[in-house]
Image (cartoon, grey):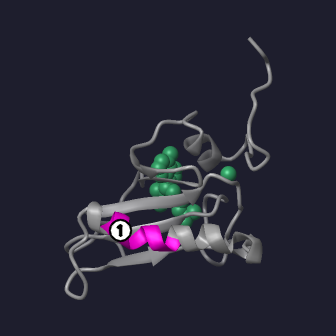
């Protein structure tokens, strides 16, 4: 068997979320297509709490540029659809919270861009 694996140029072998997107580390899938993967957060704040990530390794929102406009538009337009599918109640009584922690001051722990989608009936454990 080959000692080196074939990955796309956007794959960082030291990145937790790259490994999750590549199924090298298990996760509970919410949605997947060619560009993105969505999976349940391992320590949820609320009845609905999942993350949407690009399969491409982008460290954070701070690295996003015009070349990512289509990808970021895809992530943002998936969020409401997946939120509803996962059990967030309809707007305006229901709704959800979208968070993209960025950098140390932004409270980012995993340095692969991810959009938290958090919702469901309150009270929540946090937020
Ligand atoms: P942050 O970088 O602070 O925006 O948040 C990283 C999020 O990733 C946290 O909410 C963690 O609970 C979540 N997380 C960390 N490791 C895993 C994992 N293996 N599977 C799913 N979620 C994870
Ligand atoms: Zn990554």
Q: Is residue 79 magenta?
A: yes
| Residue 36 or residue 51, whichever sits in front | 36
Q: Residues within 10 Å of mark 1 (few under 14, many from 20)?
A: few
With respect to residue 97, does 30 lie above or below?
A: above
- Prevalent SS, magenta region: helix
Q: Position of residue 87 (x, y in %)?
A: 23, 64
| Residue position for label 1 | 81
Left or right side of 92 for 41: right
Q: Is residue 107 magenta?
A: no
Q: Is residue 101 something one can see in this rendering?
A: no
Q: Position of residue 14 (x, y in %)?
A: 73, 43
Q: Does the beta carbon of the residue at mark 1 sit less than 8 Å from ligand 1?
A: no
Left or right side of 101 for 6: right
Q: Position of residue 13 (x, y in %)?
A: 73, 40
> Circle 1 — which element?
helix
Which residue ends up furthest to the top in the rendered image? 1
Location of residue 121 (image quadrant): bottom left
| Magenta-tinted stretch | 76-83
Q: Residue at x 68, y 54 (%)?
A: 56
Q: Position of residue 21 (x, y in %)?
A: 57, 45
Location of residue 83 (image quadrant): bottom left
Left or right side of 62 for 125: left
Q: Residue at x 64, y 46 (%)?
A: 18
Quadrant of image for the C terminus: bottom left
| Residue 71 or residue 5, whichever sits in front | 71
Q: Residue at x 45, y 42 (%)?
A: 27
Q: Is residue 49 something one can see in this rendering?
A: yes
Left or right side of 5 for 19: left
Quadrant of image for the N terminus: top right
């Amino acid at each position: 068997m080959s000692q080196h694996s074939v990955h796309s140029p956007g794959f960082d072998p030291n990145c937790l979320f790259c490994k999750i997107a590549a199924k090298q580390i298990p996760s509970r899938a919410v949605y997947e297509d060619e560009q993105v993967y969505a999976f349940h957060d391992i320590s949820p704040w609320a009845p609905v709490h999942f993350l949407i990530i690009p399969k491409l390794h982008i460290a954070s929102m701070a690295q996003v540029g015009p070349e990512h406009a289509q990808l970021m538009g895809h992530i943002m337009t998936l969020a409401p659809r997946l939120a509803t599918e996962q059990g967030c109640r309809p707007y305006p009584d229901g709704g959800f919270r979208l968070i993209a922690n960025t950098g140390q001051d932004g409270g980012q722990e995993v340095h692969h861009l991810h959009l938290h989608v958090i919702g469901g009936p309150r009270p929540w454990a946090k937020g």
